[in-house]
Image: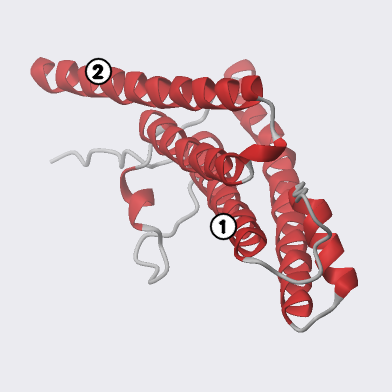
Amino acid sequence: MAEHPSPRSATKLRPLPALIFASRWLQLPLYLGLIAAQAVYVYHFWVELVHLLEAAFGSQTALQALVNSIGYHGDTQISSLNETIIMLVVLALIDVVMISNLLIMVIVGGYETFVSRMGLDGHPDQPEWLDHVNASVLKVKLGTAIIGISSIHLLKTFINAANYEEKVLLWQTLIHIAFLLSAIAIAYTDKLLNSSHVDKH
């Protein structure tokens, strides 16, 4: 009985298709650049966290750095941490974490989908979502992650609403709604495509 070739066995390509297929490696510097951006976010997170801890122990320099970074302007001179500043700083830290998660999804999921397999099968730390990742799933996950980040930004704006013009609040709300509708449309389209694919089989 003749043996069937493995679907993963290497296939010799003609020169032009081989060149076109190899061009996917041009994306590698982009993903390495995102890793560098991730490192910048980690540094920024720790700078803000150290400022928060120093301000909690009475450092006026750290407090002023926090006030400037979050764009908070009260009616009186701020001499100590208050609940609003703490909440805005914590939300900013959460925002950094969520953007970092988004970067990880783009780096790992994008590399696995568009560049090369990472060979993580059986690895104890393999992300659960990476088992069934493809371009459609990645778009939906990125859409939901962007909604989460937009929600954090919107909450920060509402907490500090006195320092924003009404049109800024309105536009941020409308943009958040646009993100939400876009994610719903992407998820619905993906559902329709999957249903059509299943029906054909």
Residue type at mark 1: give it.
Ile
Kindly give the residue lying farthest to the bottom in the view shown: 57
Left or right of 88 in this view: 53: right
Q: Quarter of the image holding residue 157? A: top right
The image quarter in which residue 122 lies: bottom left
Quarter of the figure with residue 34: top right
Comparing labels 1 and 2, the label whose residue is closer to the camera: 1
- In this view, the residue in front, 188 or 7, is 188
Q: Residues within 10 Å of mark 2 (few under 14, many from 20)?
A: few
Neighbours of disc 1 within 10 Å: few (<14), some (14-19), many (20+): some
Q: Is residue 197 left or right of residue 149?
A: left
Which of the two residues, 8 or 168, is positioned nearer the viewer here?
Answer: 168
Quadrant of the image containing the C terminus = top left
Q: Secondary structure at mark 1?
A: helix
The disc placed on residue 103 is none
Q: Is residue 19 above or below residue 113?
A: above
